[in-house]
Amino acid sequence: MNLALFDLDGTLLSGDSDVEWAQFLISRGVLDREVFEVKNREFFEQYRAGTLDIKLFLDFQLAPLARHPRAELDAWHTDFMRQAILPMIGSAARLCVREHIDRGDLCAIVTATNRFVTAPIAREFGIEYLVATEPEELNGEFTGGISGEPCFREGKITRVEAWLNGLGKDLHLGFERSWFYSDSLNDLPLLERVSNPVAVDPDATLRAFAETRGWPIISLREPAAP
């Protein structure tokens, strides 16, 4: 069996679900535009530069989840999927995932974005497994905190290994080949752990690194072949 791991934001999506979720809440009047829009973009630029403090960001991102009932959040997310996420999913991204699924590879999305935002997106791609930052819950409602280690940078390795161990598998010994598709310099730790790292529409740092290492560089923004 082979393993195929996919980053989400900027890789399978032609945008960032973290950023778009906050913008969606701003557009609904749930979050104050003057306060949150600037902060949202600041965090995004820090992420792109590789300087993001993940704990500060998660405090910002998860706090709104604790202010509203789960049923209301779920209803909002249905609209969010239709308005913001589906337009960011291209045919090439869908085809890339489908090829791995059809070959019988064990597939998972591995993302720093929290599970509430990303679980419906994983289902849209037909991917059974999601390794994501886990928002803390109490009696079915979000607390605004996180459960366990954030799925970010080296934390992605920790979380992937824990997920695989739960399936009785090992990242290094359990697969003939392993892929990880990502656009971001923040994912270099996990990219270096798989046998087949793939840079997808990469940022400048990852592109230079991939060129030096001879890693494939692809685009999922282009239309898939019929």
Image (cartoon, helix red, strand yellow):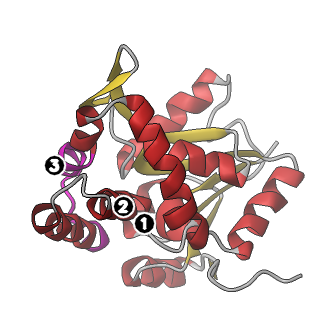
Disc 3 versus disc 1: distance between alpha carbons? Answer: 18 Å
Q: Is residue 58 magenta?
A: yes
Question: Residue drawn 39% across and 84% down?
Answer: 204
Image location (x, y in percent) of residue 182 = 53, 66
Image location (x, y in percent) of residue 209 = 45, 78
* Of 164 and 84, the residue lying toward us: 84
Question: Residue drawn 31% across and 72% down?
Answer: 48
Disc 2 versus disc 3: distance between alpha carbons? Answer: 20 Å
Does 25 appear above or below 1? below
Instruction: Quickly name the residue at label 1.
Output: 16
Q: Which mark is residue 56?
A: 3
Q: Earlier in the sequence, mark 3 or mark 1?
A: 1
**Visible residue check, residue 180:** yes
Q: Secondary structure at mark 2?
A: helix
Q: Residues within 10 Å of mark 1 (few under 14, many from 20)?
A: some
Q: Is residue 27 magenta?
A: no
Left or right: 126 with respect to 148?
Answer: right
Give, as a three-letter code, the residue at label 3. Leu
Instruction: Quickly name the residue at label 2.
Output: 24
**Residue segment shown in magenta:** 47-61
Question: Residue drawn 21% across and 40% down?
Answer: 63
Image location (x, y in percent) of residue 102 = 88, 53
Q: Secondary structure at mark 3?
A: helix
Of badges 3 and 1, the one in the foreground is 1
